[in-house]
Image: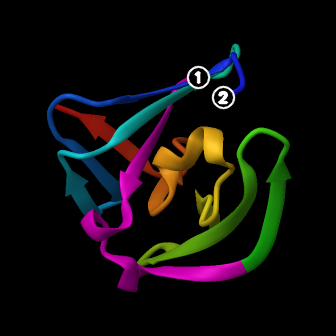
Amino acid sequence: MSSHITITPIEGPVSIAAGKISLGESRNALEMREGGYPPVVYVPRGDIAMGKLKRTTRATTCPWKGQASYYSITTPDGVLDNAVWSYEEPKADVAQIAGHLAFYTDRVTVTRG
């Protein structure tokens, strides 16, 4: 693993909401810390209402994590474009995040506890 990335389980529940819409709650979320960036919460897909997400054509590549796919969220107030990302086939050093989703916290509320 790149020496600047750590992944640890989060104790207790994590809930995800887009405005007034609940996207899910998990007791199996992970926290990734990468360099000087704020920590990112990764939630298992099975704990998220995937029917509320729509895959987009956006893709980005990280040299340490691999290729990310993106999803938009439709809410009563509009669409939150590319507000969610996932490394569907992450590199071996970060394999724990496979099957998980991460959320831009300026568009989606991630609540711990």
Which residue is rendered at x = 29% and y = 38% of the image?
111
Give the residue pinned by disc 1: 38
Q: Which of 103 and 20 is in front in this view?
A: 103
Q: Which of 64 and 103 is in front in this view?
A: 64
Question: Magenta includes 48?
Answer: yes
Q: Which amino acid does label 1 sit on?
A: Pro
Left/right placement of residue 18 relative to residue 78 reads: left
Q: What SS does tag 2 mark?
A: loop
Give the residue pinned by disc 2: 1
Q: Quadrant of residue 72?
A: bottom right
- Residue 19 shows which numbered tag? none
Q: Quadrant of residue 12?
A: top left
Q: Which of 33 and 1 is in front in this view?
A: 1
Q: What residue type is labelled 2?
A: Met
Which residue is rendered at x = 18% and y = 45% of the image?
27
Q: Give the range drawn in magenta.
A: 38-56
